[in-house]
Image (cartoon, rainbow, N blue to C red):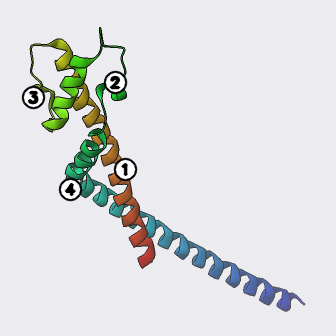
Amino acid sequence: MGGCLKIVLLIVGCIALVSFCSNRSAEQKRIKLEARIADARADAMADAEIDLEPEAQSDAQHELSDTTYVGQVGTNWCTYDCSGHEAGFAYAIENELTDTADCYENDDSFLEGCEAYVDALETLTAEKLKQKIQQAADAAEAEIRAES
């Protein structure tokens, strides 16, 4: 009976060893896959930040093209009817301004309207770029997972 028990224990030990090695191999494959995914996402994000910024800015400009100063900022900063702010905002849209340094005018409300557009454009461009970067990273991850 002692010999049978030794054989059974040996078989159980072999099964446990094979199972352990198999699980370890699967874990190593999973770790390698996750590393490849992390690298692919990082590369895609770096490339997207450079390549997609003009597209993000264009999308933001298009979205803001139908907006007014009051629609974007409100009337809190207006002292009368917001016409100066609206004119500055419209000027910035029409001239596709992207830098507040390009907003120059003697009238404070015009200048504030122009700067409000540029600020809104910068914020919206950053949001759209963030979305595009995330989409690029997700696509890179999906491609790696499809290969695996």
Label 4 and label 1: CA atoms lie apart by 13 Å
CB atoms of marks 3 and 2 within 8 Å: no
Percent across and percent down for residue 38 are 38, 60
Q: Callout 2: helix, strand or loop?
A: helix
* Label 1 SS: helix
Alpha carbon distance from label 1 to label 3: 28 Å
Q: Which residue is mark 3?
A: 102
Residue corresponding to mark 2: 70
Question: What residue sits right under mark 1 in the picture?
Answer: 131
Which mark is in front, 2 or 1? 2
Q: Quadrant of residue 42?
A: bottom left
- Residue at position x 28%, y 43% in the image: 60
Q: Along the polypeptide, which appears first: circle 1 or circle 3?
A: 3
- Say which of marks 3 and 2 sits in front: 2
Q: What amino acid does circle 4 point to?
A: Asp
Q: Position of residue 138 (x, y in %)?
A: 41, 61
Q: 68 or 148: which is nearer to us?
A: 68
Q: Earlier in the sequence, mark 3 or mark 2?
A: 2
Classed neighbour count for the residue bearing mark 1: other residues with Cα under 10 Å, few (<14), some (14–19), many (≥20): few
Q: Residue furthest top?
A: 79
Image quadrant in which you'd find residue 108: top left
The residue located at (90%, 90%) in the rendering is 1
Q: Amino acid at mark 3?
A: Asp
- Horizontal and vertical percent position of residue 2: 87, 87
**To which quarter of the image does residue 61 belong?**
top left
Q: Position of residue 132 (x, y in %)?
A: 33, 53
Looking at marks 4 and 3 on the same chain, the residue that comes earlier in the sequence is marked by: 4
Label 4, on which residue? 51
User: Which one is nearer the viewer's eye here, 74 or 49?
Assistant: 74
Ranked by sequence position, the earlier of labels 4 and 1 is 4
